[in-house]
Amino acid sequence: KLAERAELMISADYNGYYGSKSLENYTDNIVSATALFGYHAKRIFDMKLGVTYSFDNNTVLDKSQHHILPYLYAGADALENGAVVPYVEFDSKLINNSYQQLQRINPYIAMPAEVSLLPNTVEYNARVGVSGHVGGNKFAYRLYGNMGLIKNALYWYSPTPAYFDAEV
């Protein structure tokens, strides 16, 4: 019976970012491995617990970082029909701040030398809420409160007010 209610997911991932021309010495490699275990007690209780290990190697910063990124989800369907499912969830992720990724976010970014020195961002989120579906599964909802902690967050700003036609 445990095998019918349990799930196990294991995955590995590699992302490599490499510079060329003036950035030929730039490489940012992220190697990750994830293990996730889930248990479903009929329709009453769902739980998922996992962890991701990420090795973050940036040659320009000349340092490597190891990240342990946890994941937890627990939800209870007391009515056993999916209409009201209170839950708690904690997740985390490593966000790459390579020049290529920053160009996707902001295509107008210039390439000062400092951009290649940006460390990657680590984000942790905790949620408490309620989700469910009503109307014969035609309407799904998810209401929650979220608290997040971000390490090495990116901030976009202009060092010169003239870019905004502002008076100095």
Image (cartoon, rainbow, N blue to C red):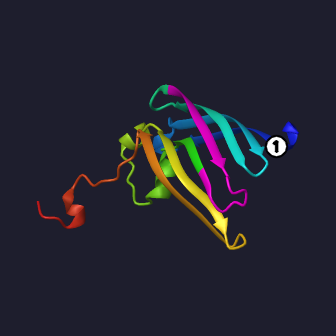
**Residue found farthest to the left:** 168
Q: Quadrant of residue 57?
A: top right
The residue drawn where x is 55% and y is 42% is 90
Tell me the magenta residue range: 64-86
The residue drawn where x is 54% and y is 37% is 28
Location of residue 65 in the rendering, given as x and y in whole percent from the top left corner: 52, 27
Crowding near the residue tagged with mark 1, few <14, some 14–19, many ≥20 C-alpha atoms within 10 Å:
few
**Residue 11 within the magenta-colored segment of the rendering:** no
Whether residue 92 is visible to the viewer of this picture, yes or no, is: yes
**Residue 65 within the magenta-colored segment of the rendering:** yes
37 vs 108: above or below: above
102 vs 24: above or below: below
Quadrant containing the C terminus is bottom left
Which amino acid, by three-letter code, is at mark 1? Arg
The residue drawn where x is 63% and y is 34% is 52
Q: Main secondary structure of the magenta part?
A: strand
The residue drawn where x is 85% and y is 37% is 2
Mark 1 lies on a secondary structure that is: helix
- Give whichever of 159, 88 is nearer the camera: 88
For residue 148, side relative to residue 91 (left or right)? left
Disc 1 marks which residue? 5
Location of residue 118 in the rendering, given as x and y in whole percent from the top left corner: 42, 39
Q: Quadrant of residue 51?
A: top right
